[in-house]
Image: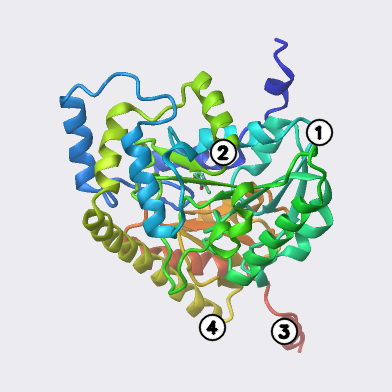
Amino acid sequence: MKLSRLAENTPPSGILAISNAVKKRAGADEQLLNYTVGDFNPQLFPIPRLLEDEIIKAYRNRQTNYPATDGNEDLRVAIAAFVKKHQELCYNPSEIMIGSGGRPLLFATYHMIVDPGDTVIYPVPSWNNHFYVQLTGAIPRVIETKPENNFMPVADEIRPFIKDAVLLALCSPQNPTGTCFKTAQLKAICEMVVEENARRHKDEKKLYILYDQIYYLLQYGRQPHISPVTVCPQVQPYTIYIDAISKAFAATGVRVGWCYGPEPVISKIKTMLNHVGAWAPMAEQKAVTVLLNNDNAVVTYLNGFKEALLQRLTKIYKGILQMKMKGLPIDAIAPEASIYLSVKIELPQDMTTVLLEEAGVALLPFRVFGAAHTPDWYRLSVGTCRMEDIAPMLRGLQRALEAHMQPPQDCCAATANKTRR
Ligand SMILES: Cc1ncc(COP(=O)(O)O)c(C=O)c1O
């Protein structure tokens, strides 16, 4: 059957292909540790109790009709106050749009800025930019980030592509790496964008930054979350922020997200999503309003949640460093944020299937995040990780690595010589 060009050319998700295969297998193997998902086991990580109660209450109060098309006014007011408190940024409720999670807002931001044939710059590994580029018919300029920069892009890598670009898609904390921008690194990028826009003729399209910060409340270090407008206020007219409750409140299935930025862009996003109808449900909007207005509930929840996530990430990270000390070909980046650990396994073959079959551990290779240049790196998510599973998981990992390690050349030669004698 012939369908639209869009339908024919939209590739299936590599992440979903592996996750579905793992889920199918997990059905038959209860021991399998599925660390592929960017989601949570709600038994381990429930949403805030206040949010749960308020959702139920809102349904009981018959909050079941259409929400306002750009999001309920009381929620947009609550978000403006939340942004002011957590990022020290000033946005009016009219510069905020509510959607059913981060995805429709990412989709609409791309579509309201990018025409087919326009250039979009994004780093890899990163989450789903290659799909949004495909869906808009854009020309991708892909920055292959380096482990020594914690897999975050730097200004000099972006500069060669900037002249023709209309969108620079950034994310910090980054999925899949769990790493964040440093102030100087992000400032240099933003200043470059401001300079480029000043250079453009008034009839030319500007270069916008899409800043996805959906994991920013799950940051572990002492460095506060930074974002384009905090490090470079002049970039405000060109920056669209994406955020949601999905990750910070373990609420992936509740579906409330928001974007904010310059009013002319946000108003177009509102118009487009009105036709899609990707609104957050009325009752969930009412409940999120109560949550965001309750500082104490937010802080208490985040403290407990972050501690539980960091405990897991740290335990796994330390276990990996111990294996590295023993000479095994494994390494990791110290956890900075989110639910992800970047794990390096330096063996000649892709270890995704080997680890699944021999260690019962499912990880996602960075290649499904568009990064073919880093075949040794994998994402490990702790969203479904139980503390008691970590020690057996590390033992399984160690056994699989030992089985697949090449014996050192000298040692083989020595053994062969001995046998011959
Ligand atoms: C970086 C990033 N942005 C956006 C999303 C989408 O979030 P939502 O579930 O709110 O649509 C995800 C989901 O994994 C993500 O990792």
- Residue 414 in percent (x, y) is at 73, 87
Image height of 155 relative to 286, above or below: below
Residue 325 vs 62, above or below: the answer is: below
Q: Earlier in the sequence, mark 1 or mark 4?
A: 1
Q: Residue at x 26, y 48 (%)?
A: 293
Secondary structure of the residue carrying tag 2 is helix
Nearest to the eye among marks 3 and 1: give it. Answer: 1
Give the mark, 4 or 3, whose residue is nearer the N terminus.
Answer: 4
Q: Position of residue 177 (x, y in %)?
A: 56, 60
Q: Nearer the viewer, residue 288 or 363?
A: 288
Left or right of 106: which side holds 223?
Answer: left
Residue 31 makes an appearance in the image: no
Q: Which mark is residue 117?
A: 1
Distance between mark 2 and mark 4 Cα atoms: 42 Å
Give me the C-alpha separation between circle 2 and circle 3: 63 Å
Ligand 1 within 8 Å of disc 1? The answer is no
Residue 325 is marked as: 4
Q: Amino acid at mark 3?
A: Thr
Judging by the rendered image, the residue that carries numbered circle 2 is 106
Q: Are marks 1 and 4 in contact (CB under 8 Å)?
A: no
Beta carbon at label 2 within 8 Å of ligand 1: yes
Q: Residue furthest front?
A: 202
Amino acid type, label 2: Leu
The image quadrant that residue 133 belongs to is top right
Q: CA distance from mark 3 to mark 1?
A: 65 Å
Secondary structure of residue under mark 3: helix
